[in-house]
Amino acid sequence: MTDRASSSPSSSSPPAAKRRRAGAATGPGQREARQAAILAAALAKFTAQGYAATRLEDVARAAGVAKGTLYLYFPDKQALFEAVVKDTVAPALSDAAALLPAYQGTTRELLHAISEILISRIVEGPARGILLLMIAEGPRFPELAAFHHREVVARGVALIRAIAERGLARGEITSDAAVRFPQIVIAPAMTSLVWNSLFAHIAPLDVRAFIQTYRDVLLRGLGSTDA
């Protein structure tokens, strides 16, 4: 198993010539379908087993391809994991950020609209397992943590800061706390992720109700002028 985040590339990777021959035998449509199958299998394996315990041969088997075929698309496990993040978490952030430039509603309404995207596609969606994996294993794999911060965390923080700056400019909030500490807006999503991963079978948390309540309290604390 190759794992760039913790070891050198494995000699089991197929030679470049073999990769070219195999790639040439596959049409664009087949390649896209095969890559999608590999990414779906990888998401399932990473979510169920974690990063360290996931083996590329298991991903290949779940995707219905040979291990050598998987290497045509992803040279090692870190590259595969990064592709999964870009395929699941990153698009949700992009769609949320796309709302901002032309949005005409209030800060409260904008936060609600963006929350709905992020809750449905990340906090309660298939990408939630990736965030939990990073919480659990990020300290062991600093390269993955750095990638996740760059592709997910930094973009989320920038989005929240932009929303807060917009609210201040429009006079809809009076405190710059969310500009200085955007993490206070993200906090309930992380809390609900961790809570339900540990206690869903004992005391499940209603994620939407929790985040809405937190948002109302937060906006009051930020001096919201929107009743």
Image (cartoon, helix red, strand yellow):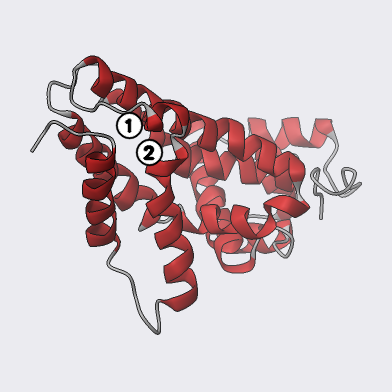
Circles 2 and 1: CB atoms closer than 8 Å: yes
Compared to residue 132, the image places residue 104 above or below, namely: above
Q: Please, what is the three-letter code of the amino acid marked with disc 1? A: Asp
How packed mark 1 is, by other alpha carbons closer than 10 Å (few <14, some 14-19, many 20 or more), is few
Q: Residue 163, image x and y in percent?
A: 31, 26
| Residue 30 numbered tag | none
Q: Is residue 87 left or right of residue 22?
A: left
Q: Residue 101, image x and y in percent?
A: 26, 16
Q: Is residue 226 left or right of residue 192?
A: left
Q: Is residue 27 visible?
A: no
Q: Residue 5, image x and y in percent?
A: 79, 45
How packed mark 2 is, by other alpha carbons closer than 10 Å (few <14, some 14-19, many 20 or more), is many
Determine whether the residue tagged by mark 2 lies in a helix, strand or loop.
helix
Q: What's the residue at 65%, 38% (across, down)? A: 73
| Residue 92 numbered tag | 2
Name the residue at the left extreme: 227
Q: Is residue 192 visible?
A: yes
Determine whether the residue tagged by mark 1 lies in a helix, strand or loop.
helix
Q: What's the residue at 37%, 38% (across, down)? A: 92
Residue for badge 1: 95
Q: Please, what is the three-letter code of the amino acid marked with disc 2? A: Ala
Along the line of sight, which residue is nearer the eye, 155 or 184?
Answer: 184
Q: Quadrant of the N terminus?
A: bottom right
Q: What's the residue at 22%, 52% (across, down)? A: 212
Along the line of sight, which residue is nearer the eye, 79 or 227?
Answer: 227
Compared to residue 124, the image places residue 185 above or below, namely: above
